């Protein structure tokens, strides 16, 4: 009674024809991030569509890899595709205290940086 069986059927003859008919992938990023940088989270701030909390993290530790353990610079204003960024503020990890404004940042190994993006 709580979870009755529901029957579904496909409207296309095969999975490949469905994939060819519909867009099955996409990205809001303007390009690839450096291989040692991870986009940890993107969350709307207080449900407001024009403001988001973005966290970036360097996934390698110091001396873990000769090349990938080096600090990396990222231009934040060019991070997202198709949206204009009007302001970027760096905050503490919990996003409750402002640190300052930023555009191009350098992320060191095992570092997590949090930003509040305001979109135009």
Image (cartoon, rainbow, N blue to C red):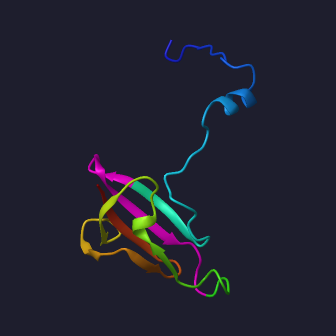
Q: Residue at x 50, y 57 (%)?
A: 29
Total number of numbered labels?
0
Residue 27 forms part of the magenta stretch: no
Residue 78 is left or right of residue 96, and the answer is: right
Q: Position of residue 104 (x, y in %)?
A: 41, 77
Q: Residue at x 61, y 32 (%)?
A: 22
Residue 52 forms part of the magenta stretch: yes
Q: Position of residue 73 (x, y in %)?
A: 49, 79
76 or 1, which lies in front?
76
10 or 97, which lies in front?
10
Name the main secondary structure of what is drawn in magenta.
strand
Q: Residue furthest left?
A: 97
40 or 79, which lies in front?
79
Quadrant of res 99: bottom left
Magenta extent: 43-62
Residue 108 position (above or below residue 23): below
Q: Position of residue 31 (x, y in %)?
A: 55, 61
Quarter of the picture holding the C terminus = bottom left
Q: Position of residue 11 (x, y in %)?
A: 65, 17
Quadrant of res 15: top right
Residue 46 position (above or below residue 32): above
Q: Residue at x 54, y 50 (%)?
A: 27
């Amino acid at each position: 009674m709580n979870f009755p069986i529901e029957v579904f059927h496909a409207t296309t003859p095969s999975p490949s024809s469905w994939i060819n008919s519909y867009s099955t992938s996409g990205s809001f990023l303007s390009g690839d991030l450096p291989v040692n940088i991870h986009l940890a989270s993107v969350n709307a701030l207080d449900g407001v569509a024009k403001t988001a909390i973005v966290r970036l993290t360097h996934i390698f530790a110091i001396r873990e890899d000769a090349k990938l353990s080096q600090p990396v610079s990222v231009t934040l204003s060019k991070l997202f595709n198709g949206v204009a960024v009007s302001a970027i503020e760096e905050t503490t990890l919990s996003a409750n205290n402002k640190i300052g404004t930023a555009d191009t940042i350098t992320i060191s190994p095992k570092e997590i940086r949090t930003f509040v993006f305001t979109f135009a």
